[in-house]
Image: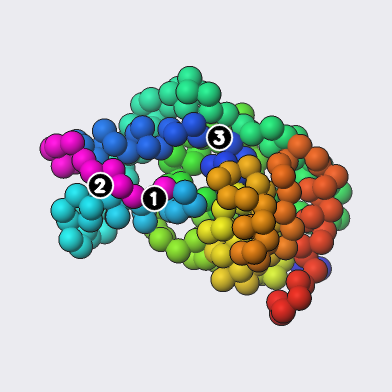
Amino acid sequence: MSDLLVLWDLDLTLLDPAGFGARMIGPALAETLGREPVMGASFAGRTDRAILTELLVLNGMERPDDDEVTRLMNSVADRCERYGQDLLDAGGGPLPGALRAIAAIAGLPADQRVHQGVVTGNMRRTALLKLRLCGFSGLPDPRLGAFGDHHADRADLVREAIAAGRSRGLQVSASSAIVIGDHVHDVRGALDAGAACIGVATGRVSADDLRAAGAHAVLPDLTDVDALLAALSGATRPAPGRA
């Protein structure tokens, strides 16, 4: 029997970041450049590595290398950790039903072998900070996850999270992994990696757009635990056209 790995996106799925990332990135980028930066990159649904690489290009670095991107990521993470309270002060926090949804899945019988991990575009340090600030005490398990430090493609995050599960002894494959996210990038990343996806229309993408992208189920939010558990059960069955 396979283990079921539920992989949660963070921003606008489990929690409202209230613009925290953008407020931290701007000053960190200004410090890196020594001047006021151009801030023209799209943030929604993308990994931190992809966002910060694009921002460096927009600000005159034609081909930033890994070291340059990593230095900027570290600078952003340092600032996030220094000013973490800003997320809560700006109105951020767990989205309605999110903490109860996590608890409901954690409370499923052990013989169902369901585990909860993270697949997020946030770099690891900022993801762990947001989870702590928003009251997610160890679940979803960041050891069963992947973060936006090293990849631009969200499918690679899903593959890395599955590999992390295997490294911890879980019998998990793409066909027994389900991504839960609010953006079409979450859906496409899951499908490209061979996993299922449940869309949650709590972000800036409509339920119709999540369905059109290929989500196996779409929920308006996380407040209905029974609907979430039913969607998880349904998503483990192949959708039409999916092997």
In 3D space, how far apart are the residues under numbered discs 3 and 1 (Cα atoms)? Answer: 17 Å
Q: Which residue is mark 3?
A: 16
Of the image marks 2 and 3, the number of the one nearer the N terminus = 3
Label ID, residue 71: 2
Queried whether the magenta region covers residue 107, the answer comes back as: no
| Residue 33 drawn in magenta | yes
Q: Nearer the viewer, mark 2 or mark 3?
A: 3
Mark in front: 2 vs 1: 1
| Of the pair 69 and 142, the residue shown nearer to us | 69
* Quarter of the figure with residue 75: top left
Q: Secondary structure at mark 2?
A: helix
With respect to residue 200, does 95 lie above or below?
Answer: above
Please give the name of the residue rendered at 35% of the width and 34% of the height, measured from the top-left corner.
24
Q: Position of residue 19 (x, y in %)?
A: 44, 34
Badge 1 local density, few (<14 within 10 Å), some, or many (20+)? few
Q: CA distance from mark 2 to mark 3?
A: 26 Å
- Looking at the image, residue 59 lies above or below residue 242: above
Q: Amino acid at mark 2?
A: Arg
Q: Nearer the viewer, mark 3 or mark 1?
A: 1
Spatial separation of the CA atoms under disc 2 and disc 1? 20 Å
In the image, what residue type sits under mark 1?
A: Ser
Residue 22: quarter of image: top left
Q: Quadrant of the C terminus?
A: bottom right
Residue depicted at x 58% and y 50%: 205
- Residue 42 image label: 1
Horizontal placement of 206 versus 111: left or right? Answer: left
**Magenta highlight range:** 32-43
In this orientation, which residue lies closer to the viewer: 128 or 229? Answer: 229
Q: In the picture provided, is 73 more to the left or to the right than 133?
A: left
Q: Looking at the picture, how far across and down is residue 135, in whole percent? A: 61, 29
Amino acid residing under circle 3: Asp
